[in-house]
Amino acid sequence: MTLRIVADENMPNVEAWFAPLASSIVRKPGRSLSSEDLAEADVLLVRSVTRVDQALLQGTPVKFVGSATIGTDHIDLPYLQSNNISFHHAPGCNAQSVCDWLLAVLSRLHLDHDLDWWQKTIGVVGAGNVGGKVVERLKLLGCRVLVCDPLRYEAGSLAEHTHLQTLLEFSDIVCLHTPHTRDGNHPTHHMIGQAQLEKMRAGSWLINAGRGPVIEPNALLAALSSGHIQSVLDVWPQEPLVPAALLNEVELASPHVAGYSLEGKFEGTRMLADALYCWAAAEQPAKVEAPKGLSLDVRAFECDDINEWLSNIVLAVYDPARDTVTMNLTAAGGDVQAEAFDQLRKSYPVRRELASTELTNIPEALLLRLEQLGFRC
């Protein structure tokens, strides 16, 4: 079987994984993809920026849709099912990337704001592939963690659950890792509004690496402008537009790239390749080689304070301050427009995960902590 494949232009390794199956591979910008682009496509491979629904697919020959994402809130699943279009995504593909992004954010906040986050109460909203990994890592590092995920709790898959209002009231740091939903018993659209933000502790931190529209933008701007809370945003309420007023109020900013590690991107494409070869009943050729690991000399970052030393090691792999500078330079005092936002994502520099970094010259005093952070020691 040979297939005509249309893929998001920013999805990596597509040719390497799919060429043996394809008669053609056409790359298209994900946000502007149209049904005309799919007039001669059997397979569509997308990311979260593409809304896949009847408007996109009706009248096209597409029979397989793959999304290199954890979530599916951009996919009209009932439409695909009713039209016998096979769908596969990549649950968990970049969960470690987001977890590492958060650890880097916390490390930067420790250096810049004396935030001893490992001694704080951290609330995690959303305990799926990403949130669950975040909870596991934070607990391993000794944090007191409160978890809110009513859907998983009601399904019996979450042992401990804290009501959202309680979590907001008692957390020093709140991390959002939810999908964006408008329906069901627990919709997340504008889940965090004025009433919820007022519940948060004065001076606490709100970190969002889930979906932007779960926060009501006007309420967030008011809470930040008043100094009631502080914030770090990877996703934005009006994304891909980032208003200057909001950008100027956040401490750290990035263009929806928390899950953009090299390893996470590789894994997302690999999972779709496995699914497509299975669907096509085709034998998959030799696997594409995974990214090679890095090496880092711990002594190069030595300082008297152990926690500062640990933070510097994490930030040597990835420092979110870099993304903040890039966002501000792109804005140039104004809004970050949609086209510029997408270009930041398209040209995002290679970022590695902590587990891909082998550390050398490790003093005994740091060994356990570095292992808990996720490094190879």
Image: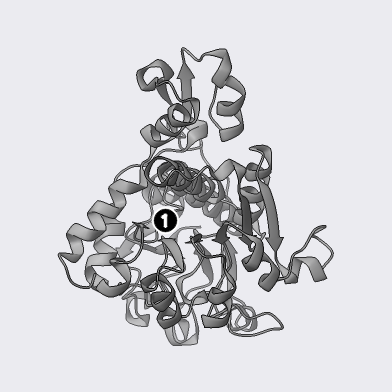
Which residue carries the number 1 mark? 22
Q: Is residue 172 left or right of residue 33?
A: right
Residue type beneath disc 1: Ala
Q: Is residue 157 above or below residue 321?
A: below
Q: Secondary structure at mark 1?
A: strand
Name the image quarter holding residue 370. top right
Colour logic: one colour
Q: Is residue 275 above or below residue 361?
A: below
**Residue occupying image coordinates x 80% and y 60%:** 157
**Residue occupying image coordinates x 60% and y 82%:** 83
Q: Would you call the spot at circle 1 few (<14 residues within 10 Å), some (14-19), or many (20 or more)?
A: some
**Horizontal and vertical percent position of residue 154:** 81, 71
Q: Is residue 251 above or below residue 36?
A: above
One can see residue 47 in this view: no
**Horizontal and vertical percent position of residue 337:** 23, 73
**Residue occupying image coordinates x 28% and y 65%:** 342
From the viewer's side, name the closer residue of 11 and 110: 110
Q: Residue furthest left?
A: 332
